[in-house]
């Protein structure tokens, strides 16, 4: 028996979401439920192309084809890693090897935490803090931590030129087996419940501990950026008229009661289902 991750069977090609801005998609089947989950990353082209997160090991071949179909490896100027999770760092080594002119944008904490898995070329690194920015030839990127996160290293990216906000794990919500492209295609109740369940069980269980008013202030600070497109790693695209309801859902998360996380009985049922299907 080997433990190599299975390559995805659902393929969605890169999606242009704004001028020179592309979402790179991966779609994963949810465990024990007829749901699908996006594992997105992003590319900003232009005179100084930026890769934002590097996908997963499972999707390596497709991810490299998708990204380098949009930008030549030698042209990549920056690689931004939002945080040290496997669904965001899966092809970091491949990118740094194939893109000799790329500077790695990450936080001090990320380098500290992830050095056990990756030999950081420190002379090619630039540390980015929450609230800092980076000037490119044609735009200024702002690094803004999303309102909820699952690692202290997390930074989001706001591009005022396109008003796209890379929200990392915030706004995460599953979609149906139809793999909806936009949250306005989701059943509204499924969106609300899905976002709350992901947030409370898979990204930010600390939501149950926070002061609701202070948390809401933080959400409103990110809302005030004025993004017109929110690209989340784990949600269908959020844009236009769906921006405000998405922030409303996010702001209300500490007040939402969610079902218990799947327990051993659910795992037993999944295993029984799998055995029955063989
Ligand atoms: Fe994460
Ligand atoms: Fe993630």
Image (tube, helix red, strand yellow):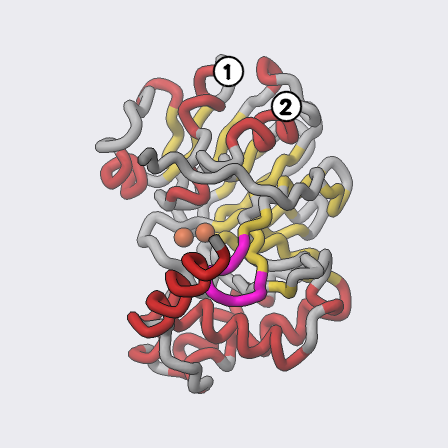
Q: Is residue 84 visible?
A: yes
Q: Which residue is mark 2?
A: 68
Q: Is residue 175 above or below residue 251?
A: above
**Does the residue tagged 2 have its C-beta within 8 Å of any atom of ligand 2?**
no
**Image location (x, y in percent) of residue 251:** 51, 77
Q: Is residue 50 visible?
A: no
**Does the residue tagged 1 have its C-beta within 8 Å of any atom of ligand 2?**
no
Q: Which mark is residue 109?
A: none
Q: Which residue is mark 1?
A: 98
Q: Main secondary structure of the magenta part?
A: loop
Q: Is residue 259 above or below residue 89?
A: below
Q: Residue at x 50, y 57 (%)?
A: 277
The local secondary structure at tag 1 comes to helix
**Image location (x, y in percent) of residue 1:** 31, 35
Q: Residue at x 56, y 23 (%)?
A: 77
CA separation in Å, label 2 and label 1: 10 Å
The one of 237 and 180 positioned closer to us in this rendering: 180
* In-image side of 261 versus 233 (left or right): left
Query: What number of labels is visible?
Result: 2
Q: Is residue 76 above or below residue 26?
A: above
2 and 1 marks in contact (CB < 8 Å): yes
**Image location (x, y in percent) of residue 258:** 43, 82
* In-image side of 205 versus 277 (left or right): left
**Image location (x, y in percent) of residue 59:** 53, 36
Q: Is residue 94 above or below residue 87?
A: above
Magenta-drawn stretch contains 226: no
Q: Residue at x 35, y 40 (%)?
A: 107
Picture quarter containing residue 266?
bottom left
* For marks 2 and 1 on the same chain, the one whose residue lies earlier in the sequence: 2
Give the extent of the magenta segment.
29-35
Few, some or many C-alpha atoms within 10 Å of disc 2 (few <14, some 14-19, many ≥20)?
Answer: some
Few, some or many C-alpha atoms within 10 Å of disc 1 (few <14, some 14-19, many ≥20)?
Answer: some
């Amino acid at each position: 028996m080997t433990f190599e991750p299975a390559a995805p069977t659902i393929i969605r090609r890169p999606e242009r979401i704004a001028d020179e801005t592309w979402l790179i998609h991966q779609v994963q089947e949810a465990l024990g439920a007829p749901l699908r989950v996006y594992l997105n990353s992003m590319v900003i082209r232009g005179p100084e192309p930026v890769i934002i997160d590097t996908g997963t090991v499972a999707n390596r071949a497709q991810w490299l084809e998708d990204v380098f179909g949009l930008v030549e490896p030698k042209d990549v100027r920056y690689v931004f890693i939002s945080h040290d999770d496997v669904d965001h760092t899966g092809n970091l080594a491949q990118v740094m090897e194939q893109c000799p002119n790329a500077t790695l944008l990450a936080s001090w904490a990320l380098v500290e935490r992830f050095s056990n898995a990756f030999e950081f070329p420190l002379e090619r690194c630039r540390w980015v803090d929450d609230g800092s920015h980076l000037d490119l030839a044609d735009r200024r990127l702002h690094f803004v931590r999303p309102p909820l996160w699952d690692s202290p290293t997390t930074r989001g990216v706001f591009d005022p030129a396109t008003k796209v906000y890379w929200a990392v794990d915030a706004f995460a919500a599953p979609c149906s087996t139809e793999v909806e492209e936009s949250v306005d295609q989701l059943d509204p109740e499924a969106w609300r419940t899905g976002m709350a369940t992901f947030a409370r069980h898979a990204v930010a269980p600390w939501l149950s501990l926070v002061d609701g008013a202070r948390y809401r202030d933080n959400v409103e600070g990110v809302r005030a950026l004025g993004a017109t497109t929110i690209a989340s790693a784990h949600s269908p695209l959020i844009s236009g008229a769906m921006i405000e309801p998405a922030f409303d859902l996010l702001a209300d998360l500490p007040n939402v009661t969610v079902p218990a996380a799947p327990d051993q009985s659910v795992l037993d049922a999944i295993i029984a289902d799998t055995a029955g299907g063989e």
